[in-house]
Amino acid sequence: MLELTDVSKIFQTSFLRRDRKVAVDCVSFRLKEGEILGLVGESGCGKSTLGRLAVKLMQPSGGHIFLDEKDVTDLPERQFREYRQRIQIVFQHPESALNPHFTLMDSILEAFYRLGTPKSDYQTMLERLANEVNLPLDIVDRYPNQVSGGEIQRAVLTRVFAFKPRYLVLDEPTSMLDVSVQAHILQLLKKKAREDRMGMLFISHDLEVVRAMCDRVMVMKEGRIIEEGTADKIFTDPSTPYLHKLIANV
Amino acid sequence: MSLLKIRGLSVTFDTLQGPFKAIEDIDLDVEELDTLAIVGESGCGKSVLGHATMRLLDDIAVVRGSVIYRGREVYAMSRKELLEMRGKAISLVPQSPSASFNPVIRIGKQITELIEKAGVAHGMEAEQRALTYLEYVGFSDPHAIFGSYPHRMSGGMCERALIAMSTSTEPDLIIADEPTKGLDALSRKNILDMLHRMTAESSLIMITHDLKAAAMCKRIAVMYSGEIIEIGPTRVVLEHPVHHYTRGLIDAQPSRGMRPIPGRHTICSHKSEGCRFRDRCDRVRTECGRHTLLREIEEGHMVRCHYA
Amino acid sequence: MELSLPGNLFRLLNDTGIKSLDQNPLRSLGIIILTALVLVAVFAPYLAPHDPKQTSIPYQSPSSEHLLGTNDLGQDVFSELIYGARVSLTIGFLSGIISIVIGVTVGIFAGYFRGWAEELLMGTTDVFLLIPSLPLMIILAAYLNPSMWNIIVVVGLLCWCSTARLVHSRVLQVREMQFIESTRALGYSDLYIIIRHVLVNTKDIIYAKFSLAVASAMLSEASLSFLGLGDPLNISWGEMIHFAFSRGGFANDMWWWYLPPGLMICVTLLAFIMLTIEGRKDSKILELI
């Protein structure tokens, strides 16, 4: 279980000028294995920041993060590194998701090096993973600007799945993709959550996608979670006016 | 007389690796106050079509065919006529809103500049007009937006300002390239409402991959691999699609079951014979290898398929 | 549906310019000239018809024996020119390397780590940028012993600031890209990310800045030498002009003495600048399709 309790993040705009901006304000949630938890909200509501806090790409200003019952909030980066294989993140923009000077293969290999996979296993491992995410093997020696956004996201998933993470934060993974590519990738993620019991925090502003994907949904506004419940309940019986407005606009 | 008439438009890019055909043989008519959505996925050539209509690709591509705007051939216009037409008669709302403004010039100045260039108004009057249009696109405090720099605004705000800019000259035709891409639900709704209001006074070509957004237009053209494969009234195309690619697109939407289309879209720069969708189509037969034209199957509904 | 480009279509977009030389004649020309110059410098003893230190009849006009005549001590100007390439290029390259190493290190650390490190490093850079470097170089060169190594160090230590600024701003862009964060999420250290990811994405400006740094170092050296602050034991092109000037080459209109070193400096600088010229790219098409 991934658990966040009263997590906050306050940004100071500069080292010398002390302007403060509260991006995430006392947020708590639990993510169970095999569950897809949606996080919706307008742009700028702090949902991406929350995603980064959950994988500790940022240090929270307050609150605690528990990863499988262990408090990892104050673990220094060096010690947290061993936990990184359990929780991974996928970002929104395919155009900057991979180093433009690396081929897809190079980027995927980074995960293999980290795992310490013996060199002789690379090929079988790559084939297995690529097969899982439908990444055509004939394009792995291309550079990111030579393949489509969907193919980049597949390569990113290949690299992330190499770790066999228990939890995955998906920060708008398909908002820049075409519908049919989006359908491919979402189906694949859904299958992964069900079959491998992977817990997913699915961040999106597209309510339809969230409705099709998630078991539970949290609604975020101005850094706070204002509503939480099962997907059916949220969409059929929204309790806050804000959510009403959001749903009416779909 | 139709407002815009495109006949046999082809665009070939001369890349370092030889010619690459982005769109081929496009025929399209847009009437006065018409709204047309061009739908398709990345790489189908829809943006290229938008740019070619404005004759913006002259220096980087070979363009064949004709684009006739109000009886005048765009590809025969002099430089002066062309500059007059762009912005004033046809406006393009480009993709990636935040990159489309000059980051170091205030929004208001950029809009005013365009209005003055188009000769619609001058000086204070032009500024007033810019403010009016900023208000029109839904900014509650147009003065604040007028004086702010593009980098301080979110994607949705930039898109709205961009539409204000493109419409401030009261063009006959607005070409909006992916106006809702990457925006959240509320901003998207805003933009679509606004574009809808604009269509009371001008025609609109909306280039998008979002079928939901396309539904606000009167007609839809679906593009695949550089060709229009289906075109018709929105209701007909969305509810009774004929081409299997259109069906696939509709079924791929999250609300319609999220069924992916099998196979992958390869740009076929050489394979011009036959249906381009045949490798992925489940009804493929030998006839599909033969070339096929857009055929009218009912009033205003045309499909490029042997089985239509 | 996914878009896949034909395998070969955009292959050329990713190379640094070496593979697409046929598309970039100016860069090829730069490389050819520089290679030639380096070969001349390396094989100077075999190419020079005379020992540049050996004296004979002074102030001779060009002849088949002395292609560019002789100077005030009767030394062969052509041979001196060939040996001068060694000195000038060595000074240029070594100071270029020093300034690039300092500039890139400062720029990358300031840009990547932000916070107080950035304020401190970029503050220092700004102070260095404010110093008028040529007068300072003159003062330093005048106080230190007139040796080649001192000139290399002085020029190298004063030329890194603009590189630091440029690298810094690029790194600020690169660090915001998501692959940096996702590599961090894989559990890699900052040092690994800097070396493997940040550096490769900065390399184009590092290459360009390096050739410009070498060029400007050669120019600074020539200025210092012309003012008589060069190393008298290692005659560079700048010093040849200096001697031609101070020992009556200009006054007596002996063009074969002062013109060739000047031309060599120009040609070398031009070659370095041509190296940095970018080739044609198809990026606009990528945006559209």
Image (spheres, grey):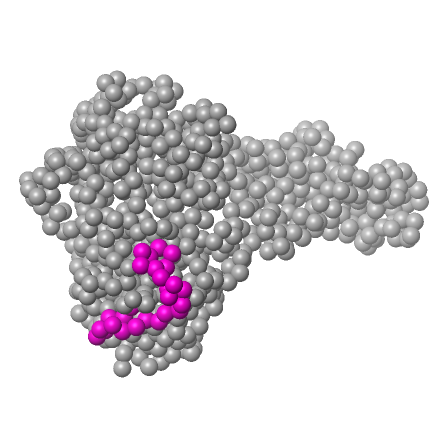
Q: Position of residue A215 (x, y in %)?
A: 17, 36
- Which residue is rendered at x = 38% and y = 20% of the image? A78
* Residue B174 image offset from top left, x and y in percent: 27, 67
Q: On screen, C18 above or below A80? A: below
Quadrant for residue B163, please give it.
bottom left
B93 in relation to C45, above or below: below
Residue C85 x, y percent position in the rendering: 75, 42
- Which residue occupies the foreground of this view, C53 or B134? B134
Location of residue B57 (image quadrant): bottom left
Residue C280's quadrant in the figure? bottom right
Please give the name of the residue rendered at 15% of the width and 51% of the height, measured from the top-left corner: A250
At x 39%, y 35%, the residue is A129
Tell me if residue C275 can be seen.
Answer: yes
* Image quadrant where one finds the C terminus of chain C: bottom left
Front residue of this view, candidates B221 and A196: A196
Question: Does residue B297 belong to the magenta stretch?
Answer: yes
Asked if the stretch drawn in magenta spans residue C127, the answer is: no
In the displayed structure, does residue A231 sit left or right of residue C245?
left
Number of numbered tags placed on the structure image:
0
> Which residue is located at x 43 percent, y 66 percent?
B273
Q: Please state the extent of the stretch shown in magenta in the rendering.
A: B278-303
Determine whether, in the image, residue C212 is placed left or right of residue C148.
Answer: left
Q: Is residue C251 visible?
A: no
The one nearer the camera, C232 or A6, is: A6
Residue A128, placed above or below residue B290: above
Q: Position of residue B268 (x, y in %)?
A: 44, 59
Left or right of residue B67: residue B237: left
